[in-house]
Amino acid sequence: MKHDLGRDWLVLIAGSRWEGTRGTDHRLAVALAKTHQVLWVDPPVPLIGPAAQGRPGIYPGFKVDPIGEGLVRLRVLVPPKFTKPLVRPVASLLLHRAIRRIVDTQPTRPLATVLMSPRETFPHGMPGRKVLHVTDDWAAGAELMGLQREKIEGTLRANLKRADIVTVVSPHLVGILPRLGTSADPVVLPNGCHVPAGVEPVDETVERTTVGLIGQLNERLDMDLLERLVDTGLPIDVIGPRRERNPETTRRLDHFLAAPNVTWTDEIPESDLWGRSLAMAVGITPYADTEFNRASFPLKTLDYLAAGLPVVSTNLPAVRWIGSPLINVGHSAQEFVDLVKRAQSAPLRASELGERQALARRHSWDARAAEMLRLLTASTVKP
């Protein structure tokens, strides 16, 4: 391995590829990399197939590349169809072996292995602490992710038993995980946001009229709410990739996005997203009341606040945990729509923007990374 990761470094086993949609794993990795070197481990790369783009060579079977300040990526080649039951153990073996080979080439041991994937397990024989960071109710969301619930639950149980530290993104998850056998007390480490420095002052003379919906479009959304919003005639700006699997959701999303008052843009760079959000009047988090969503901590809610936008959300445990009157909660469909209409018609004041951004800064990714590192120094390593 050509890359010396330095004295203080971490292994982060991600749930998505680095070039994929930037979720919790990406954002936490970037924050951790400000103070520590991070070895980002991509999900396995198959020898052939659509996901084989940029695959490593057959020998040595893995590749390490710098991808950003303080960030290095490990990609590991595995057989095709590696998600199948007979091939999956081989893929995990190859992934774990590559990680250990990287560890063996370093002058220092990693401080910790941070596991953020519902599919992978902790590699055996790894020095340092083992941190399981649970980003969703993975078992409840197995079908949404195209996975088998029984397999995900089995993997989660195994990881919970081996973890030195268990962190979860929402308070709802704290009540779920003990039933699956963890001996560590889960710590709530929610998602965060990034508030750029030097944001331009708000021009109070500029009229903002757009209702903003940012993020992945899938079964997590309350389609009844979205259809009621369309019926109001309010202009709705939707930004994000479609990730739905259910045909009925596809049909309803097609209808929603084709409405004359809806503008849809697929996934765009974060730099462009910031500019678009500053043109919105209100940001919405219209999540359905499901088992999966009750355990979630939507990134979009804090991202709206980071942009200084008023926020209207459905009644999620994560919103109650934040506990701020700056987030408007719709307890019914009619109340949600009424709150959106009220926020959309109200002028955006510079003082209000400052209050929202101040709240967002208290929930920044840097703060989340600092809390995880504090937990690392306070814990002991399981034998």
Image (cartoon, helix red, strand yellow):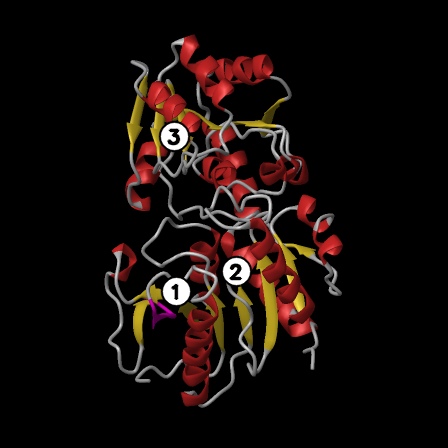
- The total number of labels drawn is 3
Residue 42 on image: x %, y %:
39, 64
Of all residues, the one furthest to the front in this rendering is: 86
Residue ID at (56%, 79%): 124
- The dot on residue 202 is 3
Q: Nearer the viewer, mark 3 or mark 2?
A: 2
Q: Quadrant of the N terminus?
A: bottom left
Q: Residue at x 52, y 60 (%)?
A: 116
Q: Mark 3, residues whose alpha carbon is within 10 Å: few (<14), some, or many (≥20)?
A: some
Q: Earlier in the sequence, mark 1 or mark 3?
A: 1
Q: Position of residue 133 (x, y in %)?
A: 58, 59
Q: Residue lying at the far top in this picture: please name it.
A: 232
Which corner quadrant of the image does residue 127 belong to? bottom right
Q: Secondary structure at mark 3?
A: loop
Helix, strand or loop under label 2 = loop
Instruction: Please give the residue where the numbered disc 2 appears in the rendered image.
Output: 116
Q: Give the percent coordinates (x, y) of residue 55.
A: 26, 67
Q: CA distance from mark 2 to mark 1?
A: 11 Å
Residue 52 location (% of width, % of height): 27, 62
Q: Is residue 70 magenta?
A: yes
Mark nearest the camera among 1 and 3 is 1
Name the residue beneath numbered marker 1: 42
Residue 6 seen anywhere in this rendered image of the structure: no
Q: Residue at x 56, y 52 (%)?
A: 135
Q: Nearer the viewer, residue 246 or 266?
A: 246
Q: Residue 148 or 352: which is nearer the viewer?
A: 148
- Quadrant location of residue 95? bottom left
Q: Amino acid at mark 2?
A: Met
Instruction: Give the residues in magenta.
Output: 68-79
Dominant secondary structure of the residues highlighted in magenta in the image: strand
| Point 63% across, 71% down: residue | 376
